[in-house]
Image (cartoon, rainbow, N blue to C red):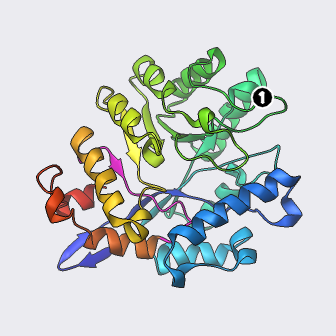
């Protein structure tokens, strides 16, 4: 819980990880390159005092995770989003099992999400059923640009993806978190294009599609889709850190989201451990749309921030 000027904010961090990007877990040059790209985001968009040494960033401890989120970072509940990258990392980069083991040691702190890849076919469907039963899944994280052999990505409109979405509906997995946003080397930019969310959201109105990173750098595409699809939400991970380095750009992003989606479909997220929730929470609560943009965008009231 965060309190400022008499206002109280219950903090749900909608996007956190417990990854292993260490050299010992890197399977090839792509594993090394992926964590390097993450680290560049971390160094480029964090305040100087929040930048970690490279070695710690690659493999931080469980104690670091708990301290940074719950003891220092004001977080009341954190949502684990796994990212497997099995072609790049020996044991996977950040798996459901790794996250789930931490969550079990800290009951009430985390929500565990699963993941699926339509290229895994029938065995993948059975694995999803097992994971749903094991971790009581209510959500999944999808990484449409993940490489698998000769394939460099997939779309939500692919026939097998439709079968997996149908399986989610059957299992009561209603929150579909999908990375649609910035490229991380060596993944392909176009495989993160937000366009396929449109068809999936229409076909599965019972499911919530949380578009992580709100489609950046395709914010306009995302907004035009989301305004027509009431089950599409915008996650602020990656967008939020610009509040420090480029606050006017962040004002335009959050302003567009408020204009098109409204205050009930925007989700706070740190993308820990790329960024730390403490400074993000403090800056977001203090943030306001600049005066010269107020006619175009609404005021960020405490209620608006509390809903996020």
**Residue 104 in which image quadrant:** bottom right
Reply above or below: 286 against 88: below
On screen, residue 297 versus residue 109, left or right, reads: left
User: Residue 269: percent from the left, percent from the top?
Assistant: 44, 58
Tally of marks: 1
Residue drawn at the location 54% of the way across and 80% of the way down: 50
Secondary structure of residue under mark 1: loop
Residue 201 highlighted magenta (yes or no)? no
Crowding around mark 1 (Cα neighbors within 10 Å: few <14, some 14 to 19, many 20+) is: few
Residue 267 highlighted magenta (yes or no)? yes
- Name the quadrant of the C terminus: bottom left
User: Residue 226: percent from the left, percent from the top?
Assistant: 34, 32
Q: Residue furthest top?
A: 159
Reply above or below: 183 against 228: below
On screen, residue 32 versus residue 273, left or right, reads: right
For the residue pair 91 and 50, the one nearer the viewer reads as: 50
Residue drawn at the location 51% of the way across and 34% of the way down: 173
Residue drawn at the location 66% of the way across and 37% of the way down: 145
**Residue 122 in which image quadrant:** top right
Q: Main secondary structure of the magenta part?
A: loop
The residue that label 1 is drawn on is: 151
User: Residue 216: percent from the left, percent from the top?
Assistant: 46, 45
On screen, residue 225 versus residue 90, left or right, reads: left
Q: Residue furthest bottom?
A: 49
- Name the quadrant of the N terminus: bottom left
Residue numbers of the magenta segment = 263-276
For the residue pair 270 and 296, the one nearer the viewer reads as: 296
Residue drawn at the location 80% of the way across and 59% of the way down: 32
Instruction: Judge whether residue 68 can be spotted in this image.
Output: yes
User: Residue 2: percent from the left, percent from the top?
Assistant: 32, 75
Instruction: Judge whether residue 91 can be spotted in this image.
Output: no
Q: Residue furthest front?
A: 292
């Amino acid at each position: 819980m965060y309190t400022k000027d008499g206002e109280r904010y219950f903090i749900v961090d909608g996007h956190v990880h417990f990854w292993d990007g260490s050299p010992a877990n890197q399977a090839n040059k792509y594993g090394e390159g992926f964590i390097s790209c993450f680290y560049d985001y971390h160094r480029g968009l964090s305040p100087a005092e929040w930048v970690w040494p490279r070695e710690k960033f690659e493999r931080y401890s469980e104690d670091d995770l708990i301290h940074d989120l719950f003891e220092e970072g004001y977080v009341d509940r954190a949502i684990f989003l796994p990212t497997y990258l099995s072609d790049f990392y020996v044991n996977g980069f950040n798996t459901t099992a790794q996250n789930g083991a931490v969550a079990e040691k800290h009951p009430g702190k985390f929500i565990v999400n699963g993941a699926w890849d339509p290229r895994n076919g029938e065995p993948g469907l059975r694995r999803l059923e097992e994971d749903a039963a094991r971790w009581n899944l209510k959500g999944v994280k999808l990484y449409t640009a993940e490489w698998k052999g000769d394939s460099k990505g997939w779309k939500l409109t692919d026939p097998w993806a439709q079968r997996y979405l149908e399986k989610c509906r059957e299992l009561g997995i209603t929150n579909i978190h999908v990375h649609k946003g910035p490229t991380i080397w060596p993944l392909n930019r176009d495989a993160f294009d937000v366009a396929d969310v449109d068809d999936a959201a229409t076909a599965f109105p019972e499911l919530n599609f949380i578009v992580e990173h709100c489609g950046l750098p395709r914010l306009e595409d995302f907004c035009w889709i989301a305004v027509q699809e009431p089950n599409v939400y915008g996650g602020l991970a990656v967008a939020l850190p610009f509040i420090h380095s480029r606050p006017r750009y962040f004002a335009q992003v959050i302003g567009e989201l408020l204009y098109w989606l409204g205050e009930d479909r925007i989700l706070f997220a740190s993308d820990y451990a790329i960024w730390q929730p403490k400074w993000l929470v403090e800056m977001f609560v203090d943030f306001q749309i600049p005066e010269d943009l107020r006619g175009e965008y609404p005021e960020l009231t405490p209620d608006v921030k509390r809903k996020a």
